[in-house]
Amino acid sequence: MDNSTQFSVKVIKGGPYVVSGNFKLDLPSGEVKEYADKTFFCRCGHSNNKPFCDGSHAKSDFDK
Ligand code: FES
């Protein structure tokens, strides 16, 4: 893997995946977005902005 696609993933207990680094995201719409910083992805299923975390996990009973 070259530096343009290096990233790491951290799992926050009761919260999102935090993806850090450079990566591309292929969305169901066919759009491809590039990210180069921390991005938060929903794990709880409650976000109104999936696949991204919108903080809704804090109001849910998700604790995994
Ligand atoms: S993990 Fe944050 S809204 Fe789902």
Image (cartoon, helix red, strand yellow):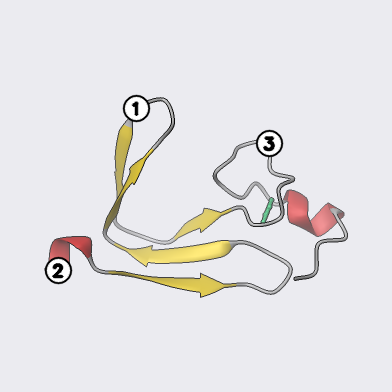
Q: State which quadrant residue 47 falls in.
A: top right
| Neighbour tally class for label 2: few under 14, some 14-19, many 20 plus, Cα within 10 Å | few
What residue sits 31% from the left and 39% below the top?
Answer: 33
- From what the image shows, is residue 29 above or below residue 55? above
What residue sits 55% from the left and 43% below the top?
Answer: 51
The image shows residue 62 at horizontal and vertical percentages of 81, 62
Contact between labelled residues 3 and 1, with CB atoms less than 8 Å apart: no
The image shows residue 6 at horizontal and vertical percentages of 24, 68
Q: Nearer the viewer, residue 55 or 14?
A: 14
Query: Disc 3 or 2, which lies upstream in sequence?
Result: 2
Identity of the amino acid at label 1? Gly
Tell whether 50 sits left or right of 58.
Answer: left
Identity of the amino acid at label 3? Asn
Contact between labelled residues 2 and 1, with CB atoms less than 8 Å apart: no
Disc 1 on helix, strand or loop? loop
Which residue is identified by label 1? 30
Task: Measure the alpha-carbon separation of dots 1 and 3.
Answer: 19 Å
Q: Nearer the viewer, residue 56 or 11?
A: 11
Which residue is identified by label 2? 3
Q: Which mark identifies residue 48?
A: 3
